[in-house]
Image: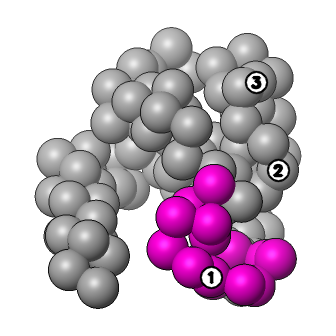
Amino acid sequence: MAVKVPTLEQVAGSGQVWPRMAEKYGASNLVPPWKSSLDGMCDALDHEGVILPLLTRRNDEDRLVHEVYPMLPYPENQLVALTHSLVARHVIDEEALAERMRQVRARLEES
């Protein structure tokens, strides 16, 4: 899976990890608010599928965590690797992802 995802590379290189973001926005929860959604998505994808074969997807994500996103801590690395694999498989459109991220950032900055 030699697909580059500039949107995710930018995020990975910007230091946007939960402890830093929690401090910036005054959140006291030690677990990122998106972690339960990530777990649910992974559970749903773990059911063997034709489009996203479980072991292939997991192996791809493990490789991405170690080779492309080693600078990210857990669970950020899991989130970014899963997203990368879904973009590479055309399940998620990178432009739509970038737009959604801009919308979320704008909401956070309004607060």
Q: Nearer the viewer, residue 87 or 22?
A: 22
Q: Is residue 105 left or right of residue 16?
A: left
State the residue at coordinates (63%, 42%): 81
Quadrant of residue 57 in the image?
top right
| Residue 27 among magenta residues | yes
Up the image or down, 57 lies above or below 38; here it is: above
Cα–Cα span, label 2 and label 1:
18 Å
Q: Secondary structure at mark 2?
A: loop
State the residue position of label 2: 74
State the residue at coordinates (20%, 80%): 110
- In this picture, which residue range is highlighted in magenta? 20-33
Q: Secondary structure at mark 3?
A: loop
State the residue at coordinates (20%, 59%): 102
| Residue 79 among magenta residues | no
Discs 2/1, front: 1
State the residue position of label 1: 27
> Around disc 2, counting alpha carbons within 10 Å, would you say few (fewer than 14), some (14 to 19), or many (20 or more)?
few
Q: Which mark is residue 70?
A: 3
Quadrant of residue 111 in the image?
bottom left
Residue 43 visible in rendering: no
User: What amino acid does circle 1 point to?
Assistant: Ala
Q: Which mark is residue 49?
A: none
Cα–Cα span, label 2 and label 3:
10 Å
User: What amino acid does circle 3 point to?
Assistant: Pro
Q: Is residue 85 left or right of residue 38?
A: left
> Around disc 3, counting alpha carbons within 10 Å, would you say few (fewer than 14), some (14 to 19), or many (20 or more)?
few
> Around disc 1, counting alpha carbons within 10 Å, would you say few (fewer than 14), some (14 to 19), or many (20 or more)?
some
